[in-house]
Image: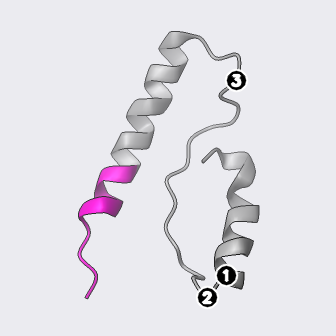
Amino acid sequence: MTDRFVATANAVAAANGLKDYPFAVIAHPVANNDDAVLREKARIAVDAIVPLLVRRSG
C-alpha cells in the first residue's frame, strides 16, 4: 500500500484484532509515475514483502 493509507490500514487491522499487522509500504502516489519511478517503487515493495512472506511465526 502507499504511505497515504497506513493510518487507515492500521486502524482497520486493530479493529480486526491484528494491532501489529505488518504492511509493505511504498511512497504515494503511484498514478502518473513514470516507468523508472514505478520500477524503484516495485523494488522497494519487494524488499519489504519478501521478509514478511518468509518470516516464521512462532
> Which residue is rendered at x = 65% and y = 83% of the image?
16
Which mark is on residue 26?
A: none
Q: Mark 2 packing: few (<14 Cα in 10 Å), some, or many (20+)?
A: few
| Residue extent of the magenta highlight | 49-58
Percent across and percent down for residue 38 are 52, 22
Q: Position of residue 18 (x, y in %)?
A: 57, 82
Residue located at (67% from left, 81% from top): 14
Q: What's the residue type where badge 3 is placed? A: Ala
* Left or right of residue 1: residue 57: left
**Mark-to-mark CA distance, 2 and 3:** 32 Å
Q: Quadrant of residue 57?
A: bottom left
For disc 1, the neighbor class at 10 Å (few under 14, some 14 to 19, many from 20) is few
In the picture shown, does residue 32 fall above or below 3?
Answer: above
Whether 49 is drawn above or below 45: the answer is below
Is residue 57 highlighted in magenta? Answer: yes
Q: Are marks 2 and 1 in contact (CB under 8 Å)?
A: yes
Q: Which residue is mark 2?
A: 17
> Magenta stretch: dominant SS?
helix
Label 3 CA crowd tier, 10 Å (few <14, some 14–19, many 20+): few
**Amino acid type at mark 2:** Gly
The residue at which mark 3 appears reads as 31
Rendered position, 39 above or below 14: above
**In terms of secondary structure, where does tag 3 sit?**
loop
Extreme-front residue of the structure: 16
**Magenta region includes residue 34:** no
Q: Which quadrant: the C terminus?
A: bottom left
Look at mark 1 in the image and give the residue it sits on.
Answer: 14
Where disc 1 sits, the SS reads helix
